[in-house]
Image: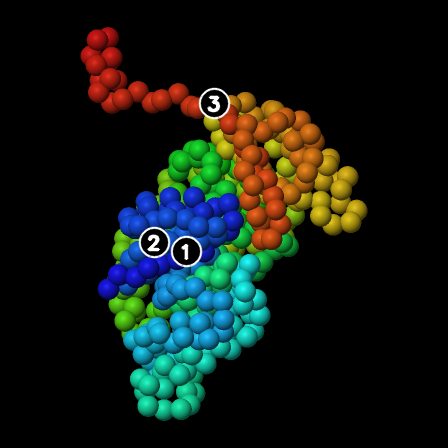
Amino acid sequence: MTYQLIAPTAFGLEAVTARELTNLGFADVHTEDGRVFFTGDADGVARANLWLRTAARVQICLAKFRAVTFEELFQGVKAIPWGDWLPEDARFPVDGRSVKSTLFSISDCQAIAKKAVVEKLKLKYGRDFFEETGALYRLEVSLLRDVVTVTLDTTGAGLHKRGYRKIAGEAPLKETMAAALIDLTYWKPGRLLVDPMCGTGTIPIEAALIAENRAPGLTRTFVAEQWSDFAPAFARAREEAKDLIRPCGEITLFGGDIDAKAVDVAQTCARLAGVDSAVRFERRDMRSYTSAEKFGFLVTNPPYGERLGEAEEVAELYRALGKVYRGLDSWSCYVITAHPEFERLFGKRADKRRKLFNGRLPCQYYQYFGPKPPRAPRADTAEKEGDSK
């Protein structure tokens, strides 16, 4: 059976998630604000959950209809064949959202949708009360400009919860955003990537997962694995994902931080993610960073200076970061921050900027492009040159 699927994502990352889905082989991929639509079967649901790096979750779209009254909402939800989706003992909490819609009371919309589901299940199972003691089927009723979208969540805890971050550092960057920041660079596996203010290591670890072709969801579970119709698909997807891992050779991914505790956490997270042999962390002050390597990538999420009393300290940090980058001949540099004066403090206008949201905080992703490395000679050309000598 083919389903209409939705991958919610952070605003500004819709095109990144859509590209991921296309590369994973999904069809009918198109975007709306904060959501990417695509189609797939049960195997597709499992694959999307295991492999998506930048999306928040994977939902099955059960219905889409217009409603400006509670009666229209009730009848629209009730029209869904709930008996085909929910077993008799299902737990089915209903979440709600409403944006620019006539029905703006989220709690009322949730209650009416829940009642509609129950009324439909009564017809299926011939009973008046449901204890909800079985597997979880989390529903969402989302209203946007009076259009209702009813979805069933297949993920559970958000996709940013990869399973390796048992200990969180202060204000960590979400794993999904870290993966997106990497995707928006020209970095490729095998090339040098450094985060000199790595905190608990999210950016280098996500780069290592990409480099080793590790499915980011391989070390966690998903709510749809509890559903009898989907459990075999997840088992197949996991076995396939394990077979596709390709361990790195030479280490080209590095993280540094002045906080020794953060570095310890980063090393633990890398081990839990299975990439501790692909990435190296060290306690180091960013201001001292130098490298003789060429064509590297500096990707970082520095402090933003949001807290009282941090403004001058962060300003000095950005000046120092600019000085470090000017000493890295041929490197590219990518920095996400909410600081409005970053370019002035850094000392250089970005080649490109992109508006992103780190959580709910509007940020800019400043992108400085270094030169492209020279192309390696083709094997057949090298052989001809060798023959002519």
Mark 1 is on which residue type? Ala
Residue sitting at the far top? 389
Name the image quarter holding residue 108.
Answer: bottom right
Horizontal relation, residue 374 to residue 354: left or right: left
- Under circle 2, the secondary element is strand
Residue for badge 2 = 38
Work out whether mark 1 precedes mark 3 in sequence or the reverse, and give the earlier one: 1
Q: Is residue 182 visible?
A: yes
Crowding near pointer 1: few (<14 within 10 Å), some, many (20+)? many
Residue 176, image x, y percentages: 48, 51
Which mark is nearer the camera, 2 or 3? 2
Q: How far apart are labels 1 and 2 at the CA level?
A: 8 Å
- Under circle 3, the secondary element is loop
Crowding near pointer 2: few (<14 within 10 Å), some, many (20+)? many
63, above or below 376, in the image: below
Residue for badge 1 = 7
Which mark is nearer the camera, 1 or 3? 1
Residue for badge 3 = 371
